[in-house]
Amino acid sequence: MDSPTSPALTKAPTKSSMENLLGLLRIRVKRGVNLAVRDVRTSDPYVVVKMGKQKLKTRVINKDVNPEWNEDLTLSVSDPNLPVKLTVYDHDMFSMDDKMGDAEFDIKAFIEALKMKLDGLPNGTIVTRVLPLRTNCLSEESCVMYKDGKIVQDMCLRLRNVECGEVEIQLQWIDLPGKGL
């Protein structure tokens, strides 16, 4: 069951950026785990995802430090070397929203798996593994796998610059007609 894609907060792509477009990266923001408290006893979290000049955000989940968004955000990818930045905020009605941590990840392993053209693998086949390192925000091993006829990557990101919290996401690729890797 797909949720509607959130509208981009940036301008529509220009013709020149459309020519360099490789495809679309769908990021399913699944849930937050043990997010920081920024109000009296809880928080009203939402997630902002940025890649280059693109910026998308999820809806706000009120009074929940373990929110379930299950929301799809779709980014246009023209440079697979750009990192994806994810920031969690606490929505406040009468003041600036408080930052609840951030994470950054790259999509290189995911893109390399897509380039392999692995159609027809058994469902659940692990194509590659990305280990948690000091240089990435993974809290556990992330597997790029062939699932239901598609390449997907599940990630559990440990938030930085905050006392606690993780965000679970899943990457999926959307090919564009006449484009491709």
Image (tube, rainbow, N blue to C red):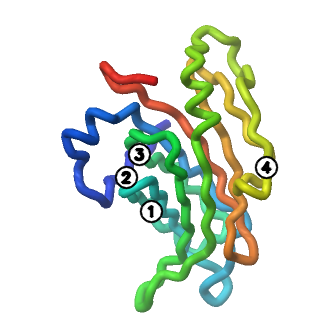
Please give the residue where the numbered disc 1 appears in the rendered image.
59
Please give the residue where the numbered disc 2 appears in the rendered image.
6
Circles 4, 3 touching at the beta carbon (< 8 Å) = no
Task: Measure the alpha-carbon separation of dots 1 and 3.
Answer: 17 Å
Circles 2, 1 touching at the beta carbon (< 8 Å) = yes
Q: Earlier in the sequence, mark 1 or mark 3?
A: 1
Q: Earlier in the sequence, mark 4 or mark 1?
A: 1
User: Which label number is shown at residue 75?
Assistant: 3
User: Callout 3: 10 Å neighbours few (<14), some, many (20+)?
Assistant: many
In this view, the residue in front, 149 or 137, is 137
Q: Is residue 162 left or right of residue 91?
A: right
Residue at (70, 12) in percent of width and height: 122
Q: How many marks?
A: 4
Q: Earlier in the sequence, mark 2 or mark 4?
A: 2
Instruction: Relative to 116, say whether 2 is above or below.
Output: below
Where residue 164 appears, as percent x and y from the top left, is 75, 72
Circle 4 — which element? loop
Where residue 158 appears, as percent x and y from the top left, is 72, 61
Residue at (46, 39) in percent of width and height: 25
Residue at (49, 36) in percent of width and height: 1
Q: Amino acid at mark 4?
A: Pro
